[in-house]
Amino acid sequence: MPWNEGEAYLVWEDLTVVLPNFGQGPTKKLLHGLTGFAKPGRIMAIMGPSGSGKSTLLDALADVFVAK
């Protein structure tokens, strides 16, 4: 993939999202080891069947899961 100097890219490597168990059994990995990138000025489609983690991926990239 050619990188253009001065452009900003959204890049994620080894992205994992874990649902905590709060002391009630094992934790659950919702996403595990995802890697990808999004280029500026390009349309990107995130596709998959219901329950495949599309919204979870977008929430993780938007930093929704970080404790504030």
Image (tube, grey):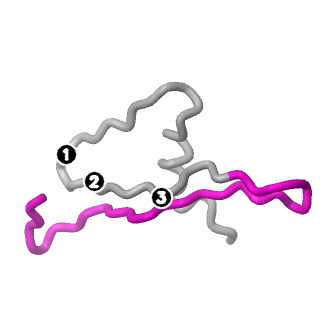
Mark 2 packing: few (<14 Cα in 10 Å), some, or many (20+)? few
Q: Which residues are magenta?
A: 1-28
The residue positioned 55% from the left and 26% from the top of the image is: 50
Q: Which mark is residue 33?
A: 3
Quarter containing the C terminus: bottom right
Mark 2 and mark 3: span between their CA atoms?
Answer: 17 Å
Mark 3 packing: few (<14 Cα in 10 Å), some, or many (20+)? few
Tell me which label, 1 or 3, sits earlier in the chain. Answer: 3
Of the residues tagged 2 and 3, which is closer to the observer? Answer: 3
Q: Quadrant of residue 2?
A: bottom left
Q: Is residue 14 magenta?
A: yes
On screen, residue 27 above or below 44: below
Kind of residue at badge 2 = Ala
* Residue on which the image places disc 2: 38
| In the displayed structure image, the side of residue 45 where residue 8 appears, left or right | left
The residue positioned 8% from the left and 67% from the top of the image is: 4
Q: Nearer the viewer, residue 15 or 59?
A: 15
Can you name the residue that lies furthest to the top here? Answer: 49
Quarter containing the N terminus: bottom left
Q: Where is residue 46 drawn, in percent x and y?
A: 38, 37
On screen, residue 23 above or below 57: below
The residue positioned 87% from the left and 54% from the top of the image is: 25
Can you name the residue that lies furthest to the right here? Answer: 24
Kind of residue at badge 1 = Arg
Q: Main secondary structure of the magenta part?
A: loop
| In the displayed structure image, the side of residue 67 where residue 35 appears, left or right | left
| In the displayed structure image, the side of residue 3 where residue 16 appears, left or right | right
* Residue on which the image places disc 1: 42
CB atoms of marks 1 and 2 within 8 Å: yes
Q: Secondary structure at mark 3?
A: strand
The residue positioned 19% from the left and 45% from the top of the image is: 42
